[in-house]
Image (tube, grey):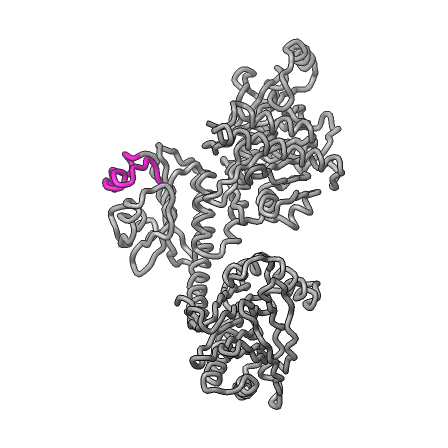
Amino acid sequence: MPPRSGDLEAALAETMRRTGASVGAFYLLVPEQDLLRLVVVGGVPADLATPWSRVALASPAPVSDALREDRMVWIGDQTEMARRYPRSAVALPYQLTLAAVPVSGERRWGSLLLMWPGSHPPRTSRRERSHITSSSRRLARLLDEAAAAGRPVTVPDTPRVLSREDVRGPTGSQPAMAAADFAERLPEGCCALDLQGRIAYVSARGAALLGGDPQALLGTLPWQALPWLDDPVYEDRYRAAVISRRPVSFTACRPPDRWLDFRLYPDASGVSVRITPAGRQPDTPDATGPDRPAPAAAPARVGQLYQLLHLTAALTETVGVQDVVDVVADQIMPAFGAQGLVLSSAESGRLRITGSRGYPRHVVEQLDGLPMDTRFTPAGQALSTGVPSFFSHPDEMARIYPEAPRVSGKQAWAFLPMIVSGRPVGVCVLTYDRPHTFPAEERAVLTSLAGLVAQALDRARLYDAKHQLAHGLQEALLPHRLPSAPGLRVAARYLPATRGMDIGGDFYDLLRIDATTAAAVIGDVQGHNVAAAALMGQVRTAVHTHATAGAAPEEVLARTNRLLLDLDPGLFTTCLYARFDLDRRRVRMVSAGHPPPLLRCPDGRARRLDVPPGPVLGVDPDAVYPVTELDLPPGAVLVLYTDGLVETAGTDIEQAIDRLAGHLATWSTEDPERLLELLLEHADPADRRTDDIALLLVRLGTATAPADPP
């Protein structure tokens, strides 16, 4: 069971009261999915929260950044929102101030989101920050206690929405009756909308101006009960009032030719609306544009339009095919109430399933690889004709494709062909567990969305192909395994920094030269592209060839330098070569402009080694590489690395190396693998790294020590 009924809602309502926030929401972390799910929200209509009801932990959004980076995210105004979080600004195009804070106790629970009207100061005070952080701690304690009692919070099918009474408390009936009498005596019309947009009260004069029956209007949405108000602009004015808490106005035409002025006055409980014939009472607080004619046809809901914009922004940020599948499944499915998804790509005359949700594996296997002209489902026909197909009931499907309902068990389907520049890319199929009607406006939005998904999928497939090529090249150029040598324990790792290609010029190697001699090499070719990787392969091969031929360390680099000058690649290379005498436990090192190695002694002390560097490879034909010789006590660990481990913008690299040596001295382990992991944890996280990292750790034992396992 979740926490005691109402505990979570009460905690959020209390937080909103304490902080003065007009909107509050709690997101629960779903660890196995790396996803934040909206659990409870207050102060806004439920459908307005749809675009941000599911937020990937890795996505650029205030609630995910707050939890991932364990800090408060403060957005002072809409300009800052657009600059820092453009996707969120698309879904919330209103003047507001926002705070997101992590909710962490015994574990990371999720994020608390609070919003204030645009009138709120753009900067937060120390007192306000204290209120916000203390509220997040109280929420964390509630969740900790519920989990300890065996009642952890769970994700509901739809977010729970706080009522007006939850946030502000109940109001008496006597003042309400007096207010109604007051409104009936006014010469202009008036009505009240709740935070969901429903008409909670309408005066007799207001109903007469609207052309409806007062009782029939109660509980309805104006843009649904009155067709002439069914325009996204009018609904958007209501949303702007709810979010910004500022008065807004618009003018609408009640057919055939009666123009009415609407003035909306919002607060935390809802929106008061004054209705007057156009031209009267011109004291509009915030006029918002010219008169508009009545719409000729029912347009898409403004919520769906914002949802479309939000999803467009999300699709532009996808990189690989799996990213596209995740966006469609995590955002498009809930936006349109679908419970199932099949995303297929057209390959060699067949429909290959790229991703799916809401289907058991055996059904996916049965649908995968169907020919384009299949009569099993409408997918092939939709793709070949470019015309989407919508089936609202299994009977409709069964008349033409009798096998489809029986196999999938679904009750409604939308088959959306994905076409790019006249070329079929695939089919996006949304499915429903119950019969589902597809209004014309929803069909139009889904069809438009399919085109956006098609472009994203086409880009993603191209990216994945390039990524596989780059990854294969990198794998081929780096050693698949390092040789074992008596008395040596080795750990190595390569981490790319380039987003997209995952390829670069950093490399490492361990060479077994003879029974008592081994060598380690690490290097960095300038650049993060295929040319850098190709040159890296040539440098590694040259070092390997000269080293195993018995060349002295200084000659290994000198000969490799001359090779690079002959190749003239236009890229320079740093390199450090270390040759170990395993019997005498000595090492001879030479450097071509490479960062100095670190040495961790058996007693835990660590320091950088003074290895005088020669010129980088491929620049000076007469370069000389000085040799540094050093005794290595048993248990000492030699750390070779590339500058991506220590180089950070705005930081002196010499100081960074000394700090790294200081960290190396604080760790109690002597195991190279564990030390390697600790060194990588010390480095910048992947999303902030600007350079590749190569690491090679060599621990020298005794000559009789057993060899490393292969």
Residue 406 lies, in percent from the top left, at 25, 38
In percent of width and height, residue 570 lies at 57, 81
Q: Please report the bounds of the magenta region as a residue range.
A: 394-413
Q: How many marks?
A: 0
Residue displayed at 50% across by 72% down: 508
Residue toward you, 63 or 336 = 63
Is 81 positioned to the left or the right of 452 in the image? Answer: right
| Horizontal relation, residue 291 to residue 395: left or right | right
Q: Nearer the viewer, residue 466 or 45?
A: 466
Residue 381 to residue 403: above or below: below
Residue 394: % across, % down: 29, 35
The image quadrant that residue 446 belongs to is top left
Q: Which residue of the protein is positioned furthest toward the bottom in this rendering?
A: 622
Q: Measured from the top left, where is residue 312 in percent x and y?
A: 52, 49
Residue 696 appears in the figure:
no
Indicate yes or no whether the magenta region holds residue 574: no
As for residue 398 lying within the magenta part, the answer is yes
* Point 38% across, 33% down: residue: 436
Residue 515 at least partly seen = yes
Residue 685 lies left or right of residue 385; in this view the side is right
Q: Classify 499 as above or below 27.
A: below
Principal secondary structure, stretch drawn in magenta: helix
Examine the rendered structure and indicate whether residue 398 appears above or below residue 683. above
Please say if 189 is above or below 648. above
Which quadrant of the rendered structure holds the C terminus?
bottom left
